[in-house]
Image: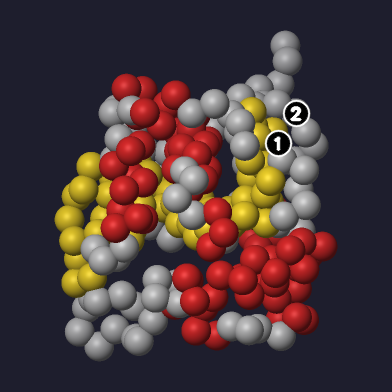
Amino acid sequence: MPTELRGPVYRIQTPRLIIRCYSPGDVFLLVEAISASLDHLRPWMPWAAEEPEPLDDKIDRLRSFRGKFDLGQDFVYGIFNLEETQLLGSTGLHTRIGPQAREIGYWIHKDYINQGLATESSGALVRVAFEIDRVERVEIHCSPNNKRSASIPKKLGFTHQETKKAAPGADSDTPLESMIWTLVQQDYPTSPAAQAKIQAYDVVGRQLI
C-alpha cells in the first residue's frame, strides 16, 4: 500500500509565481528586493526599521528560516517569478497563533504591487494550510490603515473577526491596532481561496496537490 504523501510543502507553483522555502543562496535577491522597497515597507513592517541589515546577518536569517522550516516550527517562503531570477516578495504560514492554526503574512516588492500577487500567493497558502497541513483556522492580520493589505482577505473569503488594540506597555514594534481576518475549515471549501490554481511539492519534489 503506498505511503500517504504529507507536508510540509516546500515549493508551490501558481500561474505567475514560484513560492518556495528560502535557502541562504537567495540572499542577494532578498537584499535587492528589500532595498528597492524600503520606503514602501517601513510604514507597515516593523523589521524594516532595522534595514539595511548586514549581509552576514541576513544570511543567518535565511539559515534560520530554513532551519525552522525543516524542523516544522515555522514556514517562511520567498515569492519568486517563474524563472526564479527575481524575488517579488515574501510570505509565510506562521505557527504563532497556536496549534491547528496558521497566520499568513506577506509583503510585495514595490514594483509589483497592485498586480494581485499578494492575493495569488495568499490563496495558494490557504490551500496548503487546509488541504495539506489540515489546520482548523487561518488568519491574516493587518493594520486598519493598510487598505491594500486589508483587501486581500476580503477577496479570499475571510471574515473580519475584530480589530485589536495593542496591550498597554507593548513594545514600539507592535502596531497600535490590528485587524484580524479569519477563515475556518468548515467555510474553506466554498471560499474563493479554494479555487486557487496551484501545484505543491514536498521536500523531495513529490507532488502533494
Helix, strand or loop at mark 2: loop
Judge by depth and name the residue closer to the eye, 66 or 196.
196
Q: Nearer the viewer, residue 124 or 94?
A: 124
The colour style of the image is secondary structure
Specify the quadrant that holds the N terminus.
top right
Residue depicted at x 36% and y 23%: 189
How many numbered markers are drawn? 2
Q: Which mark is residue 103?
A: none
Q: Residue at x 47, y 70 (%)?
A: 40
**How far separated are the C-alphas under marks 1 and 2?**
5 Å
Q: Classify residue 10 by image quadrant.
A: top right
Q: Is residue 29 left or right of residue 52?
A: right
Q: Give coordinates of residue 87: x percent, y percent.
A: 67, 56
Q: Residues within 10 Å of mark 2 (few under 14, many from 20)?
A: some
149 left or right, relative to 92: left
Quadrant for residue 138, please give it. Answer: top left
**Amino acid at the residue labelled 1:** Asp
> Circle 2 sits on which residue?
206
Q: Secondary structure at mark 1?
A: loop
171 lies above or below 77: below
Residue 92, position in %: x, y? Answer: 53, 53
* Place of residue 161 in the rendered image (x, y in percent of width and height, measured from the top left): 19, 50
In percent of the image, x 29 and y 84: which residue is there?
Answer: 170
Residue 182: percent from left, percent from top: 29, 45
Circles 1 and 2 in contact, beta carbons < 8 Å: yes
Mark 2 residue type? Arg
Q: Is residue 118 above or below residue 1?
A: below
Residue at far top of view = 1
Q: Residue at x 36, y 46 (%)?
A: 152
Residue 175 quadrant: bottom left
Residue that label 1 marks: 202
